[in-house]
Amino acid sequence: MHRASNTFSVLQATAAIVAMAIILWSLGISSIRFAEAANVTSFSDTLSSSAPTVASDHTITFTTPTGVTNGQTITVDFSNGPFVVGSVDFTDIDVATTSGEFTLAADCAGTDMASAAFAGTLLTITMCAGDGGLIVANGTTTIQIGLNAAGGNAQLTNPAIGSYEINLTAGASDSGSTRVAIISTVNVTASVDTLFTFSVTGVAGNQTVNGTTTGATTTATLIPFGVLDAGVASTAAQDLSIVTNARNGFVVTVTADGQLDSSTGADIDGFRNGNYAATPVAWEGPSSAVGSEETYGHWGLTSDDTDHFAATQTYVSASTTPVEVFTHSGPTDGTTTGQGTTRVGYTVQIGSLQEAADDYTATLTYVATPVF
């Protein structure tokens, strides 16, 4: 009888299930659905560098169909590889949704909306109970880990070359997986030939250089002042031009082999009165003091390059030490004023005591140096 009773009970249960199915079918309900986990969507992890064994930022984005309620957690598993966590903590992590960014702490002891902490390679983000943090159903979340997080100063380190799975759970029922590829870096190489041309050209009379009008006409290799008149300043000029692709531009200097010397032993000294001014000052004539031959006449140079001669009609002495007359800090086309071209001027003035001679000469040497 005990066995017959069991059989009857089973038949009763079966009949009840069949009857329920008939009733549901008659009501238009064709099946019974049971709650199950949902897949997160749009799940991605973007790395700032995919090179092996280097530190990299992570930007994780996903949409959770069910949402994450207050008190629940999000976990991100970096154990595949594994990625090296190092010193990354909550200060290197930002969490935001479409409705705003969460305030984070190491734990939920305070009033921050969420906590973020690594246990090994598992990152757990907890929506602190009672502090307002949650993700609505179908909400999109972005997690930034590394220097891309506000105030971040530490990054995860990539594993060796390969493809690695990142697993995520969100709340009580949503989960998903994505992959990142760690690949060798690609070296791109190229070379660019050095380009550097320097030219000197003459300037006609009645032109200007740093506010002074020229008299004599020059060529690329000759500055002919002609006969000098006492008390009258004479100016001549040359144009300099540079074409270069040097990264840091160039420097042009000019050096004199000596003063304007004559075969008789007389000379016209450097500006001013043989004191050889190295800092640009306004032009003035020689003082012509009897017995002080260095005051009988002098000559100097100027330039339109305002990096060196900011004030007009200012001069330094021509010198046996190189004097910078033209510089620029980058590549130039040789035509842009102040960058690829400038004008250098030379002025000479004598007093009535300057010794007579018809062969005062000096040799100037320009040196143009690219800066790479």
Image: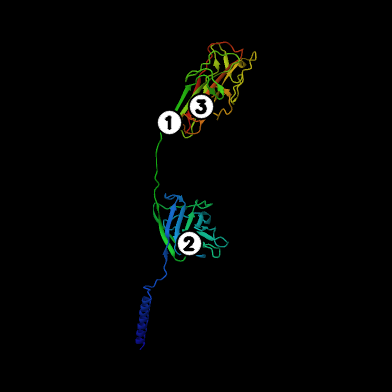
Q: How is the image coloured?
A: rainbow
Q: Quadrant of the N terminus?
A: bottom left
Q: Which mark is residue 74?
A: 2
Give 259 or 334, whichever is nearer the viewer: 334
Mark 1 or mark 3, which has the lower sequence index? 1
Task: Nearest to the eye among marks 1 and 3: give it.
Answer: 3
Give 206 or 64, whichever is nearer the viewer: 206
Amino acid type at circle 2 is Ile
Which structural element holds mark 1? loop
Rounded to the nearest angstrom, the CA distance separating label 1 from label 3 is: 19 Å
- Whether label 1 touches label 2, CB < 8 Å: no
The extreme bottom residue here reads 1
Which structural element holds mark 2? strand
Q: Which mark is residue 195?
A: 1
User: Within the image, what quadrant is residue 190 found in?
Assistant: top left
Q: Which residue is mark 3?
A: 342
Examine the rendering and report whether any part of residue 298 can be seen: yes
Which structural element holds mark 3? strand
Q: Which mark is residue 154?
A: none
Rounded to the nearest angstrom, the CA distance separating label 2 from label 3 is: 67 Å
On screen, residue 230 versus residue 250, left or right, reads right
Picture layout, residue 26 above or below residue 174: below
- Residue 323, position as x, y percentages in the image: 54, 25
Give the number of callouts.
3
